[in-house]
Image (cartoon, grey):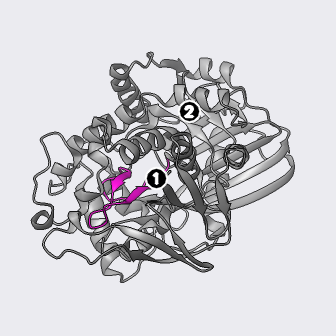
Amino acid sequence: MSRTVVIGAGVIGLACAYELRRRGDEVIVLDRIGPGAAASAGNTGWIVPSFSGPVPAPGLVGQSVRWMLSSDSPLYVKPRLDPGFLLWLWAFWKHCTKSAYEAGLDAVAALNTPTMALYDALAADGVRFEMHCQGVLFAFLGRAALEHVGADLERMRRYGYEPAETLTAHEVRDLEPLLSANVIGGIVAGRERHVRPESLVAGFVERLSALGVDLRGGTEVTGFRRRGPMSTSDRRAAGGIGAVETSTGAIDTDRVVVAAGAWSGQLVRHLGFRLPLQAGKGYSITLEQPDAQLGRPLYLDEARVAVSNFDGALRLAGTMELSGLNAGLNARRVGAIRRSADRYLVGWRRALGERVWVGMRPLTPDGLPVIGAVPGADNVYLATGHGMLGVTLAPATAVALAELMVTGRRSAALSPFDPARFLPRRSSGRVPPRGDPRARSSAVPDRREAPSGRRWTSQ
């Protein structure tokens, strides 16, 4: 039996631990705080393959420049003289092209194909969590945004999705009476689901404990111990990791999965691999026992705010703040969510209690997850960079990565997410194939397209 150490007890790490244990591994999960304490604690829990498009999108460069210096806009970039961040931002903007966006959407959509079936399988196997199958209603203040989202959803039909239903202003308010007179129309994506993420984490913890997985909170990883000397001629063939160094001592291991969210880049730097990862901070407001009752989740499109209805609760989440790795809560960002919701909804604020949350989502410059082996360490694997699609992609990521780790076979769906795409060209020794998002990294941003950017939720 192989021993695998999974670093990170968010929804991605827990899903990976679950799949590896089901395949016979002895699994130890480490987290510096505890299960679900970071980005998995307060997001909207959306399972939305129709949101497969990456964050970098056509037209986003000009729009983000207008937004980035305003601390209450949907996107806020805190000015800082950090060369690594400036390089990341430049690479991000270079991916705001039509070709890169469509290639990224296709890549994530392909990985997402089994998502709904995998969630059903989790429930059937005894993972207990709150899940709703009510679809998602997109609400719009303007016609251009409605048409752009409609085009994205139409593209998803090639992956077996049913056509989305477009609604007039009258129809959308009949469907959801809380919507205000400002809303000019809507689109219903009926196949989508959502979970209460805290319940999903708790369900994984309960099931993993029953399966004999060793879950260790309050354990910080401080480094790695190699099995043998590093090869200078072939980094990919270099010796792997024999132990994980932690704040409570070394843990011998056969394999390692780094699923530490926004902190993953710091960890793999110990292995000599530079992962361009930034923390995209998001905020949420959870109303306990609210007066307002929604029939289904809402996406307030132009505001980039998602609203989830849970059993006895309502959660609004959104914004994208690039201010580095910090857990500071910016009250202006929370206020922006409230004001945005007021443009779309009426009578939503009354509740018995309220909780405000902030969390950091891991973002890559091309907007795609990082799933696969770490160059330079033949038994260390990454599962991070999912941005706002962590809950959506967790089961599919875990299944594909576990298959790679246990059998050595990499599914075609994983190719666009290979960590090696971030190696300098002279080190990787290969040119990305035509159609791969990695081939677009040097493209000039195309500002002619209408902005997308509808992915800035806290899923």
| Label 2 secondary element | strand
Q: Residue at x 63, y 72 (%)?
A: 219
Taking 276 as reference, is 348 above or below it? above
Residue 233 marker: none
The secondary structure that dominates the magenta segment is loop
Q: Amino acid at mark 2?
A: Ala
Closest to the camera, between mark 1 and mark 2, is 1
Earlier residue among tags 1 and 2 = 2
Q: Which residues are magenta?
A: 364-388
Q: Nearer the viewer, residue 318 or 245?
A: 245
For label 1, the crowd category at 10 Å Cα-Cα, with few meaning under 14, some 14 to 19 and many 20 or more, is many
- Is residue 303 something one can see in this rendering? no
Which residue is situated farthest in the right direction here?
352
Residue at image point 61% right, 19% down: 170
Q: Image point 30% across, 71% down: which residue?
A: 273
User: Which residue is label 1 attached to?
Assistant: 387
Apparent side of residue 181 relative to residue 106 in the rendered image (left or right):
right
Location of residue 189 in the rendering, given as x and y in whole percent from the top left corner: 52, 24
Q: Above or below — where is 145 with respect to 60?
A: above
Please tell me whether residue 380 belongs to the stretch shown in magenta: yes
Q: Is residue 352 visible?
A: yes
Q: Indicate which disc residue 139 carries.
A: 2
State the image coordinates of residue 280 (x, y, percent, origin top left): 48, 62
Report which quarter residue 77 is drawn in.
bottom left
